[in-house]
Amino acid sequence: MERIKQCLILAAGKGTRLRSISADLPKPLVEFQGRPILERIVRRAQEARIEEFVIVLGYRGDQIRDWFERHCSAAARFTWVMNPDYQKSNGVSALKARNAIHDNFLLLMADHLFEPETARMMVRQHLEPGEVILGVDPDIDRIFDIDDATKVRRCGDRIVEIGKEIEEYDAIDTGMFLCTPTLFEDLDRSSRNGDCSLSDGMRRLTRDRRMRALEIDAPWHDLDTPEAFAHADAEGLLYAA
């Protein structure tokens, strides 16, 4: 089985909804229990033997890169990609990284915390050509902000519908993906007027039955609002390391 060595992290957004607690820092540098969120994500992925991180930056990207170069003690290789169009959807950020991704890769968000075993389980999966595996949480009752969550509907292990507004769903998108580089072609084909979201590309994959669900039976948190941040902090012993 091919070992996954690269991880793409999307860290370009402004994090406007977290502004009341960010002190005007870019969201990836906001501290969660003493460490910047992005540093925690990098360290968790390293526990899954990820060696290289391709990080897409936008809003105050130089500040994020400078912090990591000065302070991050994680022994990892970083490739920094700038997205001047960071105010567009997150699929645009992913496309900016296509020349830095050479093999199958783990795709993460810069504001989603997860358990190390979750990342280890993701990278152990076998990918078919052109396939994407999405980590999904079937325990809908534990989702903090269900209205804001991206929902998925499955048929067997295949995802057949994905989106925030779908009415019938049986699991939640955790923001963790295992991808082949073909994802960039799907995002390209999904673009309209130079803009696309990851969900746009994923909907194309679902139509072709190339999107598989992997159930995640461990806590994870999307730190996109002060309320979600406080909720994750209340369960913060999971992230003490």
Image (tube, grey):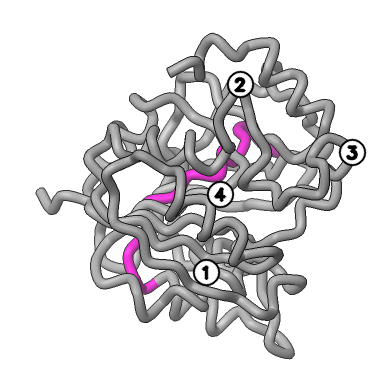
Circle 3 is placed at which residue position? 20
Boundaries of the magenta span: 168-182
Location of residue 104 with respect to 18 vertically, above or below? below
Q: Which residue is mark 1?
A: 94
Residue 103: give x, y in percent of width and height.
24, 66
> Which callout, 1 or 3, points at the residue further toward the start of the chain?
3
Q: Which residue is mark 2?
A: 33
What main secondary structure does the magenta stretch of the protein show? strand
Label 2 is placed on what type of residue? Gln
- Give the image quarter of residue 75: top left
Residue 78: within the magenta?
Answer: no
Lower position in the chain sequence, tag 4 or tag 2: 2
In primary-sequence order, the first of circles 2 and 3 is 3
- The percent coordinates of residue 123 (x first, y second) are 27, 42
> Rounded to the nearest whole Å, what is the CA distance between mark 3 and mark 4?
21 Å
- The kind of secondary structure element at disc 1 is helix
In the picture of the structure, the residue carrying the numbered disc 4 is 109
Label ID, residue 102 = none
Identified by mark 1, the residue type is Ala
Q: Quadrant of residue 128?
A: bottom left
Q: Residue at x 45, y 44 (%)?
A: 71
Pointers 3 and 4 in contact (C-beta within 8 Å): no
- Near-viewer residue (200 or 78): 78
